[in-house]
Every structure is written in C-alpha cells, then in structure tokens.
C-alpha cells in the first residue's frame, strides 16, 4: 500500500497562503520528519519555478508597439458603436454565412474526403479599422467593399471597391496571403501596401514596406518594392495598349512617397477644401500611424472638420488626439476644441476633465470660453497647472 | 473627482475611479488602464500558450471590451488587475473554442513552433530539457486547469479573486489548481524516471 500522510493538504494550503503563521511554523516542523510532505513540497516548488520561466512575451513588446496598440484601441473605442439594428442584421448575416459554409463544407467532405473545404468567410465591416484576426491588419475607406476569406493556412482578401490599406505580418512557410482584385491578383509575404479599386478596376497599388507580386490579368507579373507605386494608365494609353494594359512601375518620386498623402492634405487644407483635407489626413494617420507626420495629421483632421462646420466630428477627433498624444504641442488646442464640443453636447464633466490634463495649462478665459454654460460660476477652474 | 491623469500628479487616480470613468465613456481613463495592465494581460495570455500575434489580438479585444464590462464592475469585491486579466482569459477561452481556430490549429499542427523569445542563454542543456518537459506537461493540462494555475499560482490572485475574474466559485478554482499541480507533479516525476533511465543507459 502506498504510504500517505494526512497533512499533505497543508502543502497546497501553504502555497496558497491559507495557513496562519502558527500553522506555517507547525507544518515546517512536521516537514522535517515527513518525507512525503517534503517531497510534495519540493515538487510543487519546482513546478512553480519552472512555470515562472515559461515565455511571457515581455521582452518581445517594445514601447513603440505598445503605444501603437494603445492608439488602435483608443481609436476603435472612440468610433461610434453600430446600432442595435445593424448588430442584429450583422449577426443574422454571419449566422446565415456560417450555416451555408457548414453545409458547403459537409457536402464537399462527403464528395471528396481529401479535398480542402472552405472553413470560413469573414464578412468585412463596412468601414474603419478591422481588428486583427488573421495574418493581416486592414484599414478601409468608408466606401470600401471588401471581404476576407480563409482556407486553412491560406488567407485571401477580395477588394471590389474603395481604398484598402493592408499590413500583412511576416508569414510562416505554410501560410500564404493573396489579394483578389477585379482585374488581377497580389501575392504578399509580410508587407504594408495600399490598393485603390474604382469602377471595377485597380486604380493604384502603393507599397510602403516589403515586396509584393502584382499579377494583372493579361499582363506579366510585376514585383513592387517599398516606395513603388503602380497606377492604371489613362484612357488614351489604355486604348493604345489594350483594356488590361499596365504601365511600368513608377519610380519612387522625390521625397518619401508615403508622405505624399500628408502633403496632399496640407495643400487641400491651404486651398480651404477642408472636407477633402480632413479625409486625407485621417486616411494618412490610419494607414501610417508610425510616421512622425501622423500626429500632425490627426490634429489637422480635427481643425479641418471644425472649419467645414462638422463641429461634433471635430470634437471627437480632437478628443482622440488628446488621448493618443497627451504631451504633444497640439494637445492644448485639441483639448480646447474637444471641450467645446463636449460642452455643446452638455457633457460638462467630461468637458472640464479634458481641460484638466493639458500641459501647459489653458488660461482661465480660454477655458471659460470653451466650456460656455459648463463653466462653474463663482469659482476658479481647475486646468492643467493643477492649481484651482 | 476626475479620473483623468494629470501631469506629474503625485496621487494618480485609483483603479476603481478609472473603471468608473471608463464606464462613463472616458477614453483617457481607458488609456490609463491600458498603460497599467497591458503587460499583465499579455503575460497571462502568453503563459496560457497563445502566440505573440494571437496575444496582440486578444490584448486589443480585452481593452475594447472594458467599456462594456465596466458597467458590471464591483469595486468592493474585485481587484482591477484580476478583473482585467479575467476578461482576457474569458475572451481567450472563447477564441480557443471557435471552430475556425480549431480547424486552423489542426491544419497547422506540427508545423509551428512557439516563439521562445525569452529563453535565456544561461539555461543549461539539462535544465532546457527539463523546461521542455514541463512546458509539454503544462500545455497538456485542460484549459480550465491551466487558467487556474496561471491566475493563482503565477499571477498571485487568491482563489476568491480568480473565481470572481472567471465567474466560478472560489472552491472550484482551488480544485482546478490542486488538479493542475497534481498533473504537473506526475508528468515531471515520469520525466525524471525516464531521464534517470536514459542517463543510466548512457553510462
């Protein structure tokens, strides 16, 4: 019969901190005489020590990556939530797609047990940031129509219309990633790029990191590297070269091509085409969050929206900016803009709170002007200097 | 009192105030909670066996879940770190259960090696073998036992806190931890025996 000890339970209780100090001492004395309890205690100590050495990923996360993720979370949290009706519709559509896929998969398996069956199609959200679920991180324009499709280790993104920026993480040898276009295909292995589709044809492919292989229908494969942009030829050129003709890869233009969109935004802003400028700045900031200009772009988006009269949207953008960049040189102005919007919306507590975090502090007059009716009467405002 | 962080504030808002502010839709408070706990969440997820990229997704999903979850937060009973980690563990559990993930895992089984980015060069060959044996035993635990082990043994939550975080009684958490330890002890004892045999044959 296997030897046992009726105080073995105290090993667990000791590790869990459930013994009183007196019991801890008593059990320590018991362990000296009990080989079973000593062995159990040593085995659990060893398990704990080895478990502490399991990978934690802490060394793999740098501050920049953590900050980017923070920005993505706050950006997504700031986006308006879909209505209950839209959520219900989306759930019904998703359920229908799952049932249809299950039926297709079952049929395919019955017909050919070795044939790979499609396992999932992820219906794409209509706009904004699609959360990371697969190999790719996708940001799409509001009017974009796209969908994601997965078959085992193969992922495909189909783009029917709009501007879609993709960041594909570095893939393992077994994984493959394709973009299906109305008139071609792109294959990728770990890169960042942007695709524009209009009127059922690819208008532009721009690569900002890594390499992609672009295969237009009826034309040879083209390899595009970081900085390269391919654009569909104009009508006269295409008439000369056939309906699917493509021009050669455009050489990188002067300066950093990724900053072009920012420069375009600035030009539009100077020309007082504020709605276009805001859209351009927003797209740039979403697709190039690591660029130093992204900070200015987000702030300028708020200013442009404000100039065009979209004051609520401007306040929302400004609020996002203060959250993402609490120490920026623009934070002061963004906070005033955000406070105005919140005060207009009668969210007085939040409006005052936004002004409290700003450094250097907003002066009393400016703060009162921003808060309007939300400014407390008869007492000094608390602003970023910390002094009432 | 505002839950927002103020520059150089020697008395930053406590966790409960931050969660209350998140429930009111305060993005700054959400950012502050992220700053405080994103490393804990990632560590828990990695210890549960998720890859780096899956952990990234789940960290993001966890903090996006906070505004909704904060409406049911009970400051008198819950520890914020345990609460946030509990949300992450529950999302991770849902993530693991999804048929898609399961099928993907089946397709890729045997072809992926988990990232060992923090394996230290000081590990000797012998201890590396021991570590591998332990990791295999740890991954062989059921998800529920592994969750209990990670939250209680490694993250230092009490059974009550862990139970609140996962929505199960404290006694259940203790039982799962007890069983997890027993499984790990047995696995390591088997490994010790086979290792001793191998060394004996080598002599």
Image (cartoon, rainbow, N blue to C red):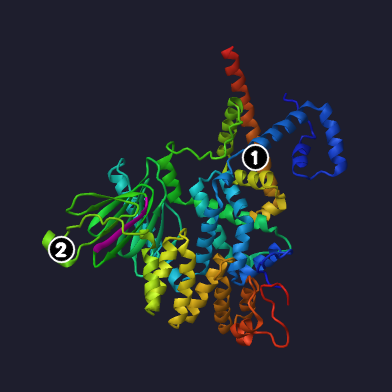
User: Residue B174: x, y in percent?
Assistant: 70, 46
Residue indicated by mark 1: A52
User: Residue A265: x, y in percent?
Assistant: 39, 71
Q: Residue at x 61, y 58 (%)?
A: B35
Left/right of residue A245 with respect to residue A359 in the rendered view? left
Image depth: mark 1 or mark 2 in front? 2
Q: Nearer the viewer, residue A163 or B49?
A: A163
Q: Nearer the viewer, residue A120 or A64?
A: A64
- Chain letter of the residue carrying label 2: A
Instruction: Give the CA distance from mark 1 to mark 2.
Output: 65 Å
Using the image, determine if residue B192 lies above or below residue B157. Answer: above
Residue A205 magenta-highlighted? yes
Left/right of residue B95 with respect to residue A147 in the rendered view? right
User: Residue A76: x, y in percent?
Assistant: 50, 65
User: Residue B148: x, y in percent?
Assistant: 64, 46
Question: Which residues lie in the magenta part?
Answer: A201-209
Task: Identify the disc placed on residue B190.
Answer: none
Q: Badge 1: few (under 14), some or many (20 or more) residues near its Cα, within 10 Å?
A: some
- SS for callout 1: helix
Task: Identify the disc placed on residue A237.
Answer: 2
Left/right of residue A358 with respect to residue A252 in the rendered view? right
List the single residue furthest toward the top. B203
Q: Badge 2: few (under 14), some or many (20 or more) residues near its Cα, within 10 Å?
A: some
Question: Dividing the image into 4 quarters, which one contains the C terminus of chain B?
Answer: top right
- SS for callout 2: helix
Residue A207 shows up from this direction:
yes
């Amino acid at each position: 019969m296997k030897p046992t000890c009726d105080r073995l339970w105290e090993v667990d209780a000791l590790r869990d901190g459930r013994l009183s100090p007196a019991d801890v001492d008593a059990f320590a004395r018991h362990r000296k005489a009990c080989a079973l309890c000593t062995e159990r205690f040593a085995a659990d100590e060893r398990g704990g020590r080895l478990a502490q050495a399991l990978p934690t990923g802490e060394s793999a996360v740098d501050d920049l990556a953590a900050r980017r993720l923070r920005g993505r979370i706050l950006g997504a949290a700031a986006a308006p939530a879909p209505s209950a009706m839209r959520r219900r519709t989306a759930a019904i559509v998703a359920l229908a797609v799952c049932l249809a896929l299950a039926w297709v998969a079952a049929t395919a398996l019955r017909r050919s047990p070795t044939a790979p069956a499609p396992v999932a199609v992820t219906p794409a959200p209509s706009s904004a940031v699609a959360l990371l679920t697969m190999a790719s991180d996708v940001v799409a324009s509001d009017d974009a129509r796209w969908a994601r499709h997965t078959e085992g280790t193969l992922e495909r993104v189909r783009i029917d219309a709009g501007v879609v920026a993709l960041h594909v993480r570095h893939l393992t040898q077994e994984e493959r990633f394709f973009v299906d276009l109305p008139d071609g295909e792109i294959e990728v292995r770990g890169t960042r790029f942007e695709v524009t589709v209009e009127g059922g044809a690819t208008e532009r492919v721009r690569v900002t990191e890594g390499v992609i292989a672009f295969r237009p229908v009826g034309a040879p494969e083209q390899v595009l590297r970081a900085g390269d942009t391919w654009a569909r030829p104009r009508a006269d050129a295409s008439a000369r070269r056939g309906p699917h003709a493509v021009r050669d890869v455009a050489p990188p233009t002067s300066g950093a091509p990724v900053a072009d969109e920012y420069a375009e935004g600035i030009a539009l802003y100077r020309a007082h085409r504020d709605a276009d400028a805001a859209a351009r700045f927003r797209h740039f900031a979403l697709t190039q969050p690591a660029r130093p200009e992204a900070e200015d772009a987000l702030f300028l988006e708020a200013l442009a929206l404000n100039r065009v009269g979209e004051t609520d949207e401007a306040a929302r953008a400004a609020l996002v900016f203060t959250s993402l960049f609490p120490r920026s040189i623009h934070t002061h102005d963004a906070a005033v803009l955000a406070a105005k919007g919140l005060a207009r919306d009668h969210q007085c507590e939040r409006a005052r709170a936004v002004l409290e975090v700003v450094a250097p502090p907003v002066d009393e007059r400016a703060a009162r002007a921003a808060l309007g009716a939300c400014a407390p009467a008869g007492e000094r405002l608390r602003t970023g200097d910390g002094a009432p | 009192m505002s839950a927002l962080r103020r520059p150089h504030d020697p008395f930053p808002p406590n966790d409960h105030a931050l969660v209350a502010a998140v429930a009111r839709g305060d993005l700054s408070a959400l950012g502050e909670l992220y700053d405080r706990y994103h490393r804990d969440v990632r560590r828990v997820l990695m210890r549960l066996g998720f890859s780096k990229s899956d952990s990234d997704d789940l960290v993001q999903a966890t903090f996006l879940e906070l505004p909704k979850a904060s409406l049911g937060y009970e400051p008198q009973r819950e520890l914020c770190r345990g609460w946030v980690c509990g949300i992450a563990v529950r999302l991770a559990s849902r993530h693991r259960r999804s048929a898609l993930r399961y099928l993907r895992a089946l397709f890729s089984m045997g072809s992926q090696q988990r990232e060992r980015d923090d394996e230290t060069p000081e590990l000797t060959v012998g201890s590396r073998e021991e570590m591998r044996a332990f990791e295999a035993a740890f991954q062989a635990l059921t998800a529920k036992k592994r969750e209990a082990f990670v939250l209680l043994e490694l993250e230092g939550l009490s059974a009550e806190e862990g139970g609140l975080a996962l929505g199960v009684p404290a006694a259940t958490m203790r039982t799962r931890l007890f069983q997890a330890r027993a499984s790990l002890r047995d696995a390591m004892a088997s490994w010790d025996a086979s290792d001793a045999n191998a060394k004996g044959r080598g002599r």
